[in-house]
Image (cartoon, coloured by chain):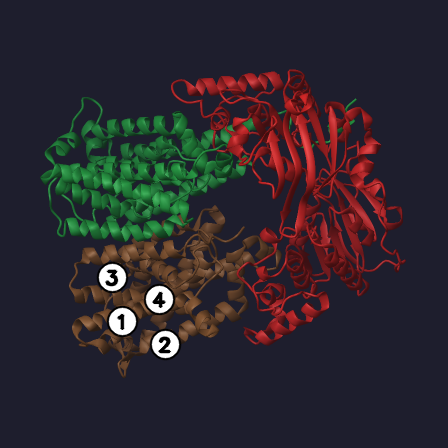
Chain colours: A brown, B green, C red
């Protein structure tokens, strides 16, 4: 009995419940047609949101004002870098992935350097950086061979028993992220900084180092995401990451991570990622227009934050 | 006879005033926006002297009015230590309403636009009462405005009302219209926010909210007013934009979120502490409007790099500001 | 009969507690018309709490408040302003982004409409001219650009400006703390004139001479109670000090003589503002006290030592790992989302690791060990830290520091508002750990705690002004040095 109650108090549960409800509604509407395919598609697409969502979650957990607005530009550039390095050849896949990772990590590191050196809020630092990255991408991406190697495209679309392999790998990755958050010094430090940066410093946490690591990690995840997206959609382009700015923040908030910092939730990112994708599928199935879809998505985000709000850390 | 009076914290009231240098640094910072604008203008004059003319300015500053209005809109929320990430899509939404309903059913159009300002006021109240992070709330709202814009105008098109077209194509003697409009906008907002007695309260709410509450002012009201003003200037920006482009598109304002934030910061505003400047914000918007394309075109910078130039300008100005405030200490 | 009518404000049996701490314990207090009441007492005696009640910013938990003989059932800041009662708070309450004239407007709703800027500027300029004739402040100056002393001048002057609301009583909480002797004198003589003209004033100051010379009546507070109240000329400096510090004296903690041979040097530090050669020296096994009035540089020095342990700093030498026990638990110590065990473990994560991961078992062991050792009263160390009482939260912070590898423990007035039972347990533990060779630097505002120290540095204005050995330590002496005349 009490275990049920404690389970119900878990904020991330609601994102899964939401995803389930949306899925059931859609299945009811189609009369059961395509129920399985819907799950497969949802898993495939949610992967990309979850990967950047986890990075964004670590950044947001650092406390009020911390957010990475450069993810879309980062994803766009990394997708181009990955495709260029791979050059359509299967033998270069690993090198291309590493290049995308390095590109993203470098962007994250530069973000933190701007925050630290210019003492500006992360919002404006990552924003200015994203302007520049965008231009680099536009000029670099022009006239490039942007098709992924066939092996890479197949890999990102590979399914076993209707479950995308990429989703399985991402589940493993998120388990790792959850362990890092709760059981590693790094994660504990992030949570401590987010709750109270001064107390964290006084408790011996290396505040500067941890923040640097977090922005770099978030950038690196953006880079990987870019490469995978380019494989999945069979090509890189400048706008490939555009929807992930809002989506990455939305899954963090809906997933039960506190915007005030210090409280993060990895499973919730998965639940929220599936919820968002399935919601889109449902609205498409219902035949509502793009406009209604956007309005509902926006209202859900505002509704969730309003319901969860009013809990800014006690200072 | 008062021996204890020597018991003061040292260095608190030095005879030689450190205020001089603080004021000088503040002046320098205040001049920074004007300086960057002058620099951009000089560069343009040097690269292409013919651009410095009535026609040249009309052309180069084509989009300066809506950018300036959006920047002013952003400035109001920033004055209250908040941020509006939805102003761009809101401008787009207003644009779509302007190009359709405001022309075909003016009464409905006016009501919808007034209603949208009311929504902004409600957001302000919600953010204050529930203690919400404005970034997330306005991020959600940016979806809503974009969706509404698509619903109003699914495909690019529509047409601005004739009266709006004639206002925006007004050709005053001697002074190009965009410059005249910028002057008027700056003067009106400067008076309202910097000179009126309630403007003081609005800025004070960003400076020291606790002191304001202790003096008996309602922080809920200040937040509502600031957000409503953001909505109002967002509406003006969207209308001005459609008056220039004559037709609308649901994505037409998307770039304005970033432009408006950059404009406020370029104009000497700060994210917290209620330190904003309407005149600076307008100058910042003009600088961005000029730097965004005319200057770069004259410099033969490919259009690919124009966004980067905006980012670089922002970083350079912020770096200059850090240098100045370091010298302040 | 007549007396009741001339009272501006009267509190009867005022009580206030914050959690388990009784800040005010049945206080009777009144201010008459045309009277300047001086209010003195050591830190935490309850002066500020009492003044917040008079100003309407805090509601009493018990007792009545009456203004001009009428009991006020729902007293608030707005009501206080309406009745002509104003307060200059110790923390500055100017808006740093606004000009002086604009800051004046905030306190006067009637300064609006056409020409308000000129009226506001004239109002504050006239008052500044009246109080501080050579102030050198312009009404157009931005508050944030002014020095802290000038900001304090503006704030005091603003409290005396007059528009529509009446002005009967002004509470001045340490109004001269940032003023030099000259401006402080100007302010106090203005206060005298104000009182002679029929106004009332409450003057709180740690500069006892100010109070003795300017107040008509002096009220001394201690431990949330009024311990003495009489006409100012009944008191002199020594009598005030005695009343504040408790003339009955304290039972000294059993002063067993401890080893005297010098241990290894652990800390050598000179405060940033120190001008003479005095410096703090701490050796292995020593308990060093940092005394003096609150906010006179003790915490700053502890923080400087703390950061010097991580990165070399001029003037400070630290030779062993350092941990800090925070006094302000909310802002410097507690991680509010975490369990007691996690709060204890954060300083020792490196040692709790098993390979790549923190071992939950080792974390639990550490927590259980300290639960027993320091006596944290909880059924489960996995409960949230806020499930503990204040004293037990503080014990958890001690466990965090003592459970770590730190050889030097900095204590930033950690026993603030902690019950006596907890205190005694922690004192024993500190002595025990020191005997094992740990070094303690102990800043405290509670003088009796200094009895646990081997020697005590007294701070004033950011400098060390005295170094008292344990055997020459008396409360009288510490108060003498911290209220001392020579800077």
Instruction: Specify which label sits upstream in the sequence, 3 or 2.
Output: 2
Whether discs 2 and 1 lie on one chain: the answer is yes
**Would residue B106 be found to the left or right of residue C23 on screen?**
left
Which quadrant is home to the C terminus of chain C?
A: top right
Q: Estimate the spatial distance between the alpha carbons at disc 1 and disc 3, rounded to whole Å.
A: 22 Å
On residue B57, the disc is none
Q: Chain of mark 4?
A: A
Q: Is residue A60 visible?
A: yes
Q: Which residue is mark 3?
A: A237
Name the image quarter holding the N terminus of chain C. Answer: top right
Tell me, for residue A169, which label it has, or none: 2
Q: Report, in whole angstroms, how far the alpha carbon at label 3 lies from the one at label 2.
A: 24 Å
Q: Nearer the viewer, mark 3 or mark 2?
A: 2
Mark 4 / mark 2, whichever is N-terminal: 4
Q: CA distance from mark 4 to mark 3?
A: 31 Å
Label 3 with label 2: CB-CB less than 8 Å:
no
Q: Is residue A29 left or right of residue C275?
A: left
Which chain is indicated by disc 2?
A: A
Are the numbered discs 3 and 2 placed on the same chain, yes or no?
yes
Q: Chain of mark 3?
A: A
Provide the residue designation for mark 1.
A42
């Amino acid at each position: 009995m009490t275990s049920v109650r404690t389970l119900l108090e878990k904020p991330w549960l609601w994102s899964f419940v939401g995803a389930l409800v949306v899925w059931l509604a859609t299945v009811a509407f189609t009369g059961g047609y395509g129920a399985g395919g819907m799950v497969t598609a949802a898993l495939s697409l949610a992967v990309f949101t979850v990967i950047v969502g986890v990075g964004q979650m670590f950044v947001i957990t650092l406390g009020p004002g911390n957010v990475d607005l450069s993810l879309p530009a980062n994803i766009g550039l990394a997708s181009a870098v990955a495709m260029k390095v791979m050059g359509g050849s299967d033998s270069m896949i690993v090198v291309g992935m590493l290049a995308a990772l390095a590109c993203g990590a470098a962007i994250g590191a530069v973000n933190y350097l701007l925050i630290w050196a210019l003492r500006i809020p992360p919002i404006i630092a990552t924003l200015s950086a994203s302007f520049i990255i965008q231009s680099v991408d536009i000029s670099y991406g022009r006239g490039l061979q942007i098709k992924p190697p066939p092996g890479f495209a197949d890999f990102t679309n590979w399914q076993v028993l209707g479950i995308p392999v990429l989703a399985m790998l991402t589940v493993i990755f998120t388990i790792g992220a959850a362990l890092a958050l709760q059981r590693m010094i790094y994660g504990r430090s992030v949570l401590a900084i987010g709750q109270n940066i001064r107390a964290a410093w006084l408790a011996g946490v290396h505040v500067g180092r941890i923040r640097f690591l977090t922005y770099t990690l978030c950038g690196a995840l953006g880079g990987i995401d870019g490469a995978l997206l380019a494989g999945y959609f069979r090509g890189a382009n400048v706008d490939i990451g555009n929807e992930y700015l809002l989506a990455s923040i939305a899954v963090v908030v809906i997933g039960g991570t506190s915007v005030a910092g210090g409280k993060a939730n990895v499973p919730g990112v998965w639940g929220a990622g599936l919820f968002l994708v399935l919601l889109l599928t449902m609205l498409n199935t219902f035949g509502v227009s793009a406009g209604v879809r956007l309005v509902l998505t926006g209202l859900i985000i505002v509704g969730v934050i309003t319901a969860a709000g009013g809990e800014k850390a006690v200072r | 006879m008062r021996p204890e009076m020597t018991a003061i914290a040292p260095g608190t009231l030095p005879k030689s005033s450190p205020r001089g240098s603080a004021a000088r640094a503040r002046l320098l910072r205040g001049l920074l926006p004007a300086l960057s604008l002058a620099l951009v203008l000089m560069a343009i004059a040097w690269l292409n002297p013919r651009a410095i003319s009535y026609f040249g300015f009309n052309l180069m500053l084509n989009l300066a009015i809506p950018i300036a209005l959006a920047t002013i809109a952003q400035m109001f929320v920033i004055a209250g230590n908040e941020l509006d990430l939805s102003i761009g899509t809101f401008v787009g939404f207003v644009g779509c309403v302007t190009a359709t309903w405001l022309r075909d059913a003016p009464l409905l159009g006016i009501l919808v636009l007034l209603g949208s300002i009311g929504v902004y006021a409600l957001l302000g109240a919600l953010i204050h009462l529930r203690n919400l992070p404005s970034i997330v709330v306005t991020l959600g709202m940016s979806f809503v405005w974009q969706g509404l814009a698509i619903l109003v105008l699914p495909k690019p098109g529509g047409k601005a009302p004739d009266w709006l077209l004639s206002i925006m194509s007004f050709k005053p003697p001697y002074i190009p219209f965009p410059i005249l409009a910028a002057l008027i906008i700056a003067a009106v907002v400067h008076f309202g926010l910097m000179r009126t007695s309630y403007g003081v309260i609005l800025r004070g709410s960003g400076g020291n909210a606790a002191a304001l509450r202790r003096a008996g002012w309602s922080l809920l009201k200040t937040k509502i007013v600031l957000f409503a003003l953001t909505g109002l200037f967002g509406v003006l920006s969207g209308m001005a934009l459609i008056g220039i482009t004559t037709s609308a598109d649901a994505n037409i304002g998307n770039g304005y979120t970033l432009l408006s934030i950059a404009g406020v910061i370029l104009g000497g505003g700060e994210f917290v502490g209620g330190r904003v400047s309407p005149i600076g914000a307008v100058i910042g918007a003009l600088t961005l409007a000029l730097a965004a394309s005319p200057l770069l075109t004259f410099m033969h910078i490919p259009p690919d790099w124009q966004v980067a130039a905006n980012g670089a300008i922002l970083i350079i100005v912020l770096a200059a500001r850090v240098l100045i405030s370091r010298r302040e200490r | 009969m007549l007396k009741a009518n001339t009272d501006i404000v009267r509190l009867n049996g005022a009580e206030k507690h914050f959690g388990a701490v009784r800040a005010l314990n049945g206080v009777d207090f009144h201010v008459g018309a045309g009277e300047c009441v001086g209010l003195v007492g050591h830190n935490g005696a309850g002066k500020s709490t009492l003044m917040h009640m008079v100003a309407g910013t805090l509601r009493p938990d018990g007792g009545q408040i009456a203004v001009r003989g009428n009991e006020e059932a729902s007293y608030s800041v707005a009501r206080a302003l309406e009745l002509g009662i104003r307060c200059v708070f110790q923390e500055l309450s100017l808006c740093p982004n606004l000009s002086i004239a604009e800051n004046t407007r905030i306190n006067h709703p009637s300064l609006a409409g056409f020409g308000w800027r000129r009226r506001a500027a004239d109002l504050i300029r006239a008052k500044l001219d009246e109080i501080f004739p050579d102030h050198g402040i312009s009404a157009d100056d931005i508050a944030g650009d002014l020095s802290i002393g000038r900001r304090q001048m503006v704030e005091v002057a603003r409290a005396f400006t007059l528009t529509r609301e009446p002005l009967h009583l002004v509470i001045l909480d340490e109004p001269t703390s940032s003023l030099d002797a000259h401006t402080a004198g100007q302010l106090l003589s203005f206060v005298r004139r104000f009182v002679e003209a029929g106004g009332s004033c409450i003057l709180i100051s740690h500069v006892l001479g100010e109070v003795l010379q300017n107040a008509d009546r002096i009220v001394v507070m201690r431990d949330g109670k009024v311990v003495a109240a009489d006409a100012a000329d009944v008191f002199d400096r020594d009598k005030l000090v005695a009343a504040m510090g408790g003339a009955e004296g304290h039972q000294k903690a059993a002063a067993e003589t401890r080893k005297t041979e010098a241990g290894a040097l652990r800390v050598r530090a000179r405060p940033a503002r120190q001008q003479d050669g005095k410096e703090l020296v701490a050796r292995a096994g020593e308990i060093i006290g940092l005394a003096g009035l609150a906010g006179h540089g003790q915490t700053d020095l502890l923080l400087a030592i703390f950061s010097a342990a991580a990165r070399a700093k001029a003037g400070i030498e630290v030779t062993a790992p350092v941990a800090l026990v925070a006094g302000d638990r909310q802002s410097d110590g507690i991680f509010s989302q975490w369990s007691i065990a996690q709060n204890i473990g954060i300083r020792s994560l490196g040692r709790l690791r098993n390979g790549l991961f923190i071992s939950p078992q080792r974390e639990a062991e550490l927590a259980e060990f300290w639960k027993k050792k320091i006596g944290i009263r909880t059924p489960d160390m996995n409960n949230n830290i806020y499930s503990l009482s204040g004293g037990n939260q503080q014990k958890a912070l001690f466990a965090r520091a003592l459970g770590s590898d730190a050889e030097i423990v900095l204590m930033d007035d950690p026993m603030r508002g902690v019950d006596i039972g907890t205190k005694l347990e922690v004192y024993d533990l500190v002595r025990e750990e020191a005997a094992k060779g740990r070094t303690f630097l102990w800043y405290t505002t509670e003088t009796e705690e200094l009895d646990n120290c081997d020697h005590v540095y007294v701070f004033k204005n950011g400098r060390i002004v005295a170094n008292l050995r344990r055997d020459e330590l008396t409360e009288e002496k510490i108060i003498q040095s911290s209220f001392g005349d020579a800077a």
